[in-house]
Image (cartoon, rainbow, N blue to C red):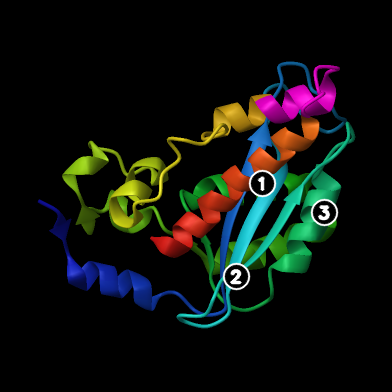
Amino acid sequence: KPYIDQTKIKDFLDKIQYPAYYMDFETFASAIPMFDDSRPYQQIPFQFSVHVVKEKGARPEHYSFLADGPNDPRPEFMAKLKEVIGTKGSVIAYNAGFEIGKLKECALLLPKYKKWVESIEERIIDLLQPFRAFAYYHPQQDGSCSIKNVLPVLTGKSYADMEIGDGGTASAEYLRITFTEDNQDKAKVRNLLEEYCGLDTMGMVAI
């Protein structure tokens, strides 16, 4: 049966300040750096999804970015993300250290975003935390607190039937349609990428 620590869950939920920005990134990496100011196997962000909940119980508003073309996506990625995320309210991610790490790396390349990234770090809330701390655990999670395991248990939504349903596939397919000639299905894959990344953030809202 599920284990539920209502006090811990309430304490966690009380930390969320509105408007709340549910944020997720997708990245790719290559052995040989594709851009100046990058290193082998560095994870380069090429996509984000943000669902904004302006007040508790409000309908989420969706914003997204998916880089197009072979140029370094980081400058446009950062510019678009800054447009979406306001100056007040919580910024929520699942395993938030990943997103903060990518933002800090981008700020090294683009120093004008350094203070902005620092302000985001002060507002960040990690939705992984209550599951990692066993404030909630369901046997059907199979011992994992990954969003891929938590989402179906709590909401009935799942990644299982998606053509692109995990970060590795998303990265590989983005690389294929963007940097190779095997890209006749580019429009379809871009739609699938939007669907996948969008579920990551809408899934957080649902959780």
Comparing 201 with 5, the one in front is 201
Direction from residue 141 to residue 163 in the image, left or right: right
Tag shown at residue 111: 3
Q: CA distance from mark 1 to mark 3?
A: 28 Å
Disc sitting over residue 52 in the figure? 2
Residue numbers of the magenta segment: 173-185
The residue labelled by disc 1 is: 194
* Residue type at numbered disc 1: Glu
Name which residue lies at 73% across and 39% down: 190
Q: Position of residue 8 (x, y in %)?
A: 24, 68
Task: Indicate whether 74 appears above or below 113.
Answer: above
Name the one closer to the observer, 47 or 86. 47
Crowding near the residue tagged with mark 2, few <14, some 14–19, many ≥20 C-alpha atoms within 10 Å:
many
Q: Is residue 105 left or right of residue 76?
A: left
Mark 3 surroundings: few (<14), some (14-19) or many (≥20) residues within 10 A: few
Compared to residue 121, the image places residue 73 above or below, namely above
Q: Are marks 3 and 2 in contact (CB under 8 Å)?
A: no
Q: Earlier in the sequence, mark 1 or mark 3?
A: 3
